Image (cartoon, coloured by chain):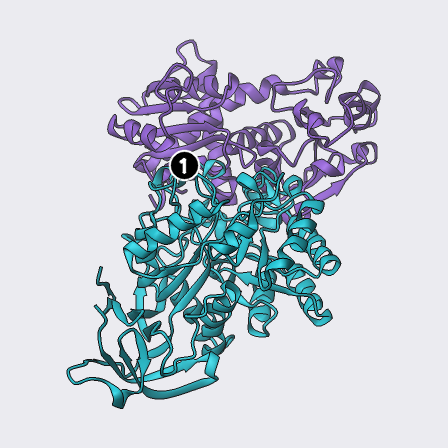
């Protein structure tokens, strides 16, 4: 049932409107309304000291359903998202069955609608079964609402196939092909970044070049085709520089970085903590600095969590046997606030842009990302930038493989409003 | 000393000397008719071997038995592990049975460190993946000091597949810690590019290194590396990096030849070279028992003498 809510006295940070000021925000019947137009008896929330922003949008999530319900379901993942301040997430296609046709896409959308916690914008597979051999039926999935296609988890290894995907997608307008940039041969068997630390830890490394070779190839194919390319979870300084040059040249390319690549380095792996085993791997402090600069100057467009839940028994094992990935929906905002905004490396406006406005644009999620203006669907997050907390299980996610466990973070989501309804109130999920 | 021995880097130079000196006193036990002392009577030592190993497992078993500990050999074939039990559950089981020390050999780098999260006893790394093999390094340091009278300033070449060798890592770190001069020698594909940050030199030319050595330490080369295209053939490897009789002639008088075993005679070492008097592989094996006795004693029983540290 739609509520009427008055968010009083918060700092409204709204990149889509270029706005950062203290103001009241009204919500009624699922939409933003002028505060003085609210019906009597509206729920009044004191938001002094809080930041009010457009609901966050995660362009890169693994909800695991169908097929991986031991790790996550659409419902538990959406609850984790809402608690993290997200009103929309983009689940990746590597489910079982693979999201390579409209039926699986619609199933995920229906499951999310039933949960009623946030919107989902499923990413479709580029190739059938993620096998890298035949194009999936992109057109049918576009009709089902898909705007981004990716074989995430693996690269489209065959350059001719990627060329055709980029070209074929031109028919559908602003539809992007999103690449997981790791060369299969150079990264095979690799457990972490190849460098000083892998040499001492005796773990097989993946060189930066395993990513950079693919980034270079994909940018060349974007140039050849005029296609719309999106590069997932960049990890190396060289990749950032290539994207910077490609954008200057005018190629249709966007790029993503994850909170964990912005926070951790390969030096953190000395404990063999399997929660820090991720693909692509955490690299050096120089790479991390380049990623942060690239995010600040707009070379990197979006922050994606790559929320990758795994059951405990896939992580409480020997390092080389552990599944790669960390969960991230419940910690992403606080990690970015603590590590980048607080030290002054990233403005709050740019952080919200990269976590809401820009990913909404990428996904064609017109209801999301702001502006926070009367008539717009009410998708909002209110967070306390000063609240500190220690990351500990349990999580709302069905999994607990968080790289951030034990870390003290600053910034806590207080309220999340999804289509005008308070799905998270005072830091607790309402459904 | 720490409670566990996971890496040579867990030890200070003083720790290393204490271990070598303690081993010195235990070596004498092995020469007696009754090769046994009661130091660890009533303590339980578990040998948890996830990889096949004859010499290291037997060496640890003998060491524990000569200290009068109860020894359990837990190998992975025909056990709960073969039925799919995880390292965690095996660890919890051994913990519940009251293991005072767990000696672990595992194909995964870092497995001994991971094991420490689940058990209360001491964990001794008997070789983990391509990470470290600290007890091998200690017995090698012991053998070098025993034969040459010192470690500081010794010129040691470690020859072969350094990239995949846990022995090479532990031994390099240990030798550098004790003031020796280490040169890693092998095909460039098998030397980590970051190795100079360990404080060692690197050479791709064995014959240029040989005349300036006190110890020539050869690593076992695995056939699998040829399949992985790190070098073209064992024949070519042997031609460039094998220790032949001719190359032994380039070594200075008194230079030791060492190998952690098992040897590939005719590949990294010519068969006749392995049988020369300056080739001390059998002494390495004998000294290994004394080193492992010293480690078990210091980690489990040595506290009464003020040896133990921050347990």
Seen in the image, is A27 located left or right of residue A207? left
Q: Is residue A405 above or below residue B141?
A: below
Residue A392 visible to an observer of this rendering: no
Name the residue carrying label 1: A317
Tag count: 1
Seen in the image, is A185 located left or right of residue A328? right
Q: What percent of the width, then of the height, locates residue A177?
A: 59, 55
Question: Pointer 1 indicates a residue of which chain?
Answer: A
Quarter occupied by the N terminus of chain B = top left
A329 or B265: nearer the eye? A329
**Circle 1: is it few (<14), some (14-19), or many (20+) Cα within 10 Å?**
many
Chain B's colour is: purple
Is label 1 in a helix, a strand or a loop?
loop
Q: Is residue A101 above or below residue B235?
A: below
Q: Is residue B62 above or below residue B190?
A: above
Q: What percent of the width, then of the height, locates residue A352?
A: 45, 73
A305 or A363: nearer the eye? A363
Q: What percent of the width, then of the height, locates residue A4?
A: 22, 78
Q: Is residue B223 above or below residue A375?
A: above
**Residue sitting at 38 percent across and 21 percent down?**
B64
A378 or A415: nearer the eye? A378
Chain A's colour is: cyan
Give the residue at the far left of this rendering. A41
Residue B255 visible to an observer of this rendering: yes
């Amino acid at each position: 049932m739609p509520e009427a809510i008055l968010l009083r006295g918060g700092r409204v940070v709204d990149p889509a409107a270029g706005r950062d000021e203290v103001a009241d925000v009204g919500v009624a019947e699922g939409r933003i309304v002028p505060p003085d137009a609210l019906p009597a008896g509206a729920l009044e929330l004191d938001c002094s000291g809080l930041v009010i922003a457009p609901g966050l949008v995660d362009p890169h999530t693994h909800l695991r359903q169908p097929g991986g319900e031991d790790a996550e379901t659409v419902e538990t993942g959406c609850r984790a998202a809402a608690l993290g301040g997200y009103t929309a997430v983009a689940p990746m296609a590597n489910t079982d069955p693979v999201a390579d046709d409209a039926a699986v896409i619609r199933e995920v959308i229906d499951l999310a609608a039933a949960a009623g916690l946030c919107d989902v914008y499923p990413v479709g597979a580029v190739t059938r079964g993620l096998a890298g051999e035949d194009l999936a039926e992109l057109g049918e999935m576009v009709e089902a609402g898909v705007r981004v296609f990716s074989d995430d988890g693996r690269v489209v290894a065959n350059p001719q196939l990627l060329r055709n995907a980029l070209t074929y997608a031109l028919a559908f307008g602003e539809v992007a092909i999103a690449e997981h940039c790791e060369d299969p041969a150079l990264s095979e068997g690799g457990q972490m970044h190849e460098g000083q630390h892998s040499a001492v830890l005796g773990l097989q490394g993946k060189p930066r070049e395993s990513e950079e070779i693919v980034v270079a190839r994909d940018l060349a194919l974007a140039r050849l085709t005029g296609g719309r390319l999106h590069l997932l979870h960049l990890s190396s300084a060289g990749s950032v520089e290539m994207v910077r040059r490609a954008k200057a040249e005018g190629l249709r390319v966007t790029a993503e970085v994850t909170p964990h690549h912005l926070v951790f380095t390969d030096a953190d792996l000395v404990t063999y903590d399997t929660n820090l085993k991720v693909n692509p791997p955490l690299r050096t402090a120089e790479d991390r600095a380049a990623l942060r600069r690239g995010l600040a100057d707009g070379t990197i467009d979006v922050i994606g969590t790559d929320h990758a839940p795994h059951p405990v028994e896939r992580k409480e094992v020997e390092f080389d046997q552990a599944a790669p990935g960390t969960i991230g929906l419940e910690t992403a905002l606080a990690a970015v606030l603590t590590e980048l905004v607080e030290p002054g490396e990233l403005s709050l406006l740019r952080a919200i842009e990269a976590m809401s406005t820009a990913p909404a644009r990428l996904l064609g999620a017109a209801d999301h990302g702001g502006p926070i203006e009367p008539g717009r669907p009410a998708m909002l997050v209110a967070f306390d930038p000063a609240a500190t907390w220690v990351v500990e299980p349990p999580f709302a996610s069905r999994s607990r493989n968080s790289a951030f466990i034990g870390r003290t973070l600053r910034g806590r989501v207080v309220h999340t409003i999804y289509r005008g309804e308070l799905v998270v109130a005072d830091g607790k999920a309402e459904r | 000393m720490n409670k566990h021995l996971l890496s040579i880097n867990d030890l200070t130079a003083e720790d290393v000397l204490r271990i070598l000196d303690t081993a010195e006193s235990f070596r004498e036990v092995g020469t007696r008719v009754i090769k046994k002392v009661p130091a660890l009577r009533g303590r339980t030592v578990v040998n948890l071997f996830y990889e096949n190993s004859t010499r290291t497992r037997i060496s640890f078993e003998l060491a524990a038995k000569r200290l009068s500990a109860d020894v359990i050999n837990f190998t992975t074939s025909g056990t709960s592990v073969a039925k799919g039990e995880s390292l965690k559950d095996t660890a919890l089981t051994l913990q519940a049975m009251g293991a005072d020390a767990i000696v672990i050999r595992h194909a995964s780098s870092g497995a001994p460190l991971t094991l420490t999260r689940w058990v209360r006893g001491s964990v001794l790394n008997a070789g983990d993946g391509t990470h470290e093999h600290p007890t091998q390094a200690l017995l090698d340091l012991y053998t070098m000091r025993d034969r040459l009278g010192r470690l500081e300033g010794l010129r040691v070449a470690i020859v072969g597949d350094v990239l995949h060798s846990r022995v090479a890592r532990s031994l390099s770190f240990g030798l550098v810690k004790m003031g020796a001069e280490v040169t890693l020698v092998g095909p460039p594909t098998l030397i980590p590019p970051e190795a100079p940050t360990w404080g060692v030199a690197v050479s791709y030319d064995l014959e240029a290194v040989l005349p300036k050595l006190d110890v020539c330490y050869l690593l076992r080369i695995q056939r699998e590396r040829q399949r992985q295209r790190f070098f073209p053939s064992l024949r070519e490897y042997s031609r460039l990096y094998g220790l032949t009789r001719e190359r032994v002639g380039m070594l200075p008088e008194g230079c030791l030849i060492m190998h952690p075993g098992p040897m590939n005679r005719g590949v990294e070492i010519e068969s006749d070279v392995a049988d020369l008097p300056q080739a001390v592989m059998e002494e390495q094996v004998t000294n290994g028992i004394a080193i492992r006795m010293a480690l078990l004693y210091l980690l489990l029983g040595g506290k009464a003498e003020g040896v133990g540290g921050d347990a």
